[in-house]
């Protein structure tokens, strides 16, 4: 009798440990049930997940954390289809990598005044030039990781009516930007640029008004930064922000290369980025070990409100 009892206990223990063995050792190789039957009883065991790479776990945690944080947004208002690339491509790529959703509005394609290379090909029409510039700008936005839309308001001259103003105000409401990038308020070489800047400013103000489309969410007071004009000293533009874009320069230059219609500007804007990089490095002090090679300059339009001056 005693031997029979010992035998039964041995069989039960063997079944129990074999079940655990299956759960722990063989889980990575076989699909097993969550239960093991021992005699007349069913025992439940939690599934043991396969071992995961620490990098995968870290990435999963990062993605989970990002999903829990409301995504920040930014809005770029560009007079022509290439302006956002030359002047703000680094800022766009940098903030996309930081988790921002960046949206670009191109008010025009620059089909008349900024597409000389295309017109010199001959047998060109305005619609063909627009189509070419549209393709270039879309490709550049894709490289930078931003969304883009085109107002097709025409250029040289760029003119805005109330409908265009309200359309841009609606974009502000939809995007709810945390900051805005646009042109300088003056540019004696290209009147389209300050018009775009003033249109962005006015649309921002309208989007803040409770009485404009009541019931919609108004925007706050996103800071506005004017990106660098072609000849700053003639435009009253003085940078008070130098943005380090070294880490995303290759991405910006890839976007620049999408602008085949203005290839003559590729080298110029490379030099501008290098110059601003030198200035940024100098402004952080010689004691800093940070390497800055490429930069972008911006002029803020509004005072910065802060509790920390460091």
Image (cartoon, grey):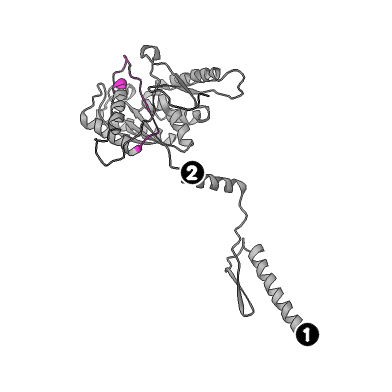
- Circle 1 SS class: helix
158 displayed left or right of 176: left
Circle 1 packing at 10 Å, graded few (<14), some (14-19), many (20+), is few
Residue 134 position, x and y percent, is 32, 33
192, above or below 49, in the image: above
Res. 66 mark: 2
Q: Residue at x 60, y 58 (%)?
A: 49
Residue 257 position, x and y percent, is 43, 28
User: In this view, which residue lies farthest toward the top?
Assistant: 234
- In the rendered structure, which segment of residues is drawn in magenta? 175-195
267, above or below 178, in the image: above
User: In this view, which residue lies farthest toward the right?
Assistant: 3
The quarter of the rendered structure image containing the N terminus is bottom right
* Pointer 1 residue: 2
Residue 8 position, x and y percent, is 72, 81
Q: Mark 2 to mark 1: distance in Å?
A: 63 Å
Res. 93 mark: none
26, above or below 9, in the image: above
Residue closer to the observer: 190 or 169: 169
- Of badges 2 and 1, the one in the foreground is 1
User: In this view, which residue lies farthest toward the front?
Assistant: 307
């Amino acid at each position: 009798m005693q031997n029979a009892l010992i035998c039964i206990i041995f069989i039960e223990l063997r079944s129990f440990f074999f079940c655990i063995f299956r759960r722990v050792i063989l889980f990575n190789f076989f699909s097993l049930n969550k239960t093991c039957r021992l005699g007349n009883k069913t025992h439940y065991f939690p599934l043991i997940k396969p071992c995961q790479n620490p990098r995968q776990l870290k990435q999963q945690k990062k993605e989970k954390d990002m999903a829990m944080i409301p995504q920040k947004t930014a809005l770029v208002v560009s007079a022509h289809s290439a302006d956002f690339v030359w002047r703000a491509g680094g800022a766009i790529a940098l903030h996309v990598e930081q988790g921002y959703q960046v949206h670009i509005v191109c008010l025009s394609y620059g089909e008349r005044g900024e597409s000389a290379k295309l017109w010199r090909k001959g047998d060109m029409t305005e619609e063909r030039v627009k189509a070419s510039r549209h393709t270039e700008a879309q490709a550049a936005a894709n490289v930078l990781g931003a969304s883009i839309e085109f107002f097709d308001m025409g250029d040289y001259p760029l003119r805005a009516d109330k409908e265009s103003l309200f359309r841009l105000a609606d974009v502000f409401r939809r995007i709810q930007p945390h900051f805005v990038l646009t042109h300088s308020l003056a540019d004696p070489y290209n009147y389209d640029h300050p018009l775009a800047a003033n249109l962005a400013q006015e649309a921002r103000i309208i989007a803040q008004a409770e009485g404009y489309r009541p019931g919609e969410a108004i925007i706050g007071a996103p800071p506005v930064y004017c990106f660098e004009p072609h000849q700053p000293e003639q435009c009253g533009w003085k940078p008070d922000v130098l943005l380090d874009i070294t880490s995303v320069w290759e991405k910006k230059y890839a976007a620049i290369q999408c602008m085949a219609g203005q290839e003559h500007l590729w080298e110029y804007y490379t030099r501008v980025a290098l110059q601003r990089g030198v200035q940024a490095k100098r402004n952080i002090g010689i004691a800093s070990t940070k390497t800055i090679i490429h930069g972008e300059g911006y002029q803020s339009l509004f005072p910065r409100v802060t509790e920390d001056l460091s």
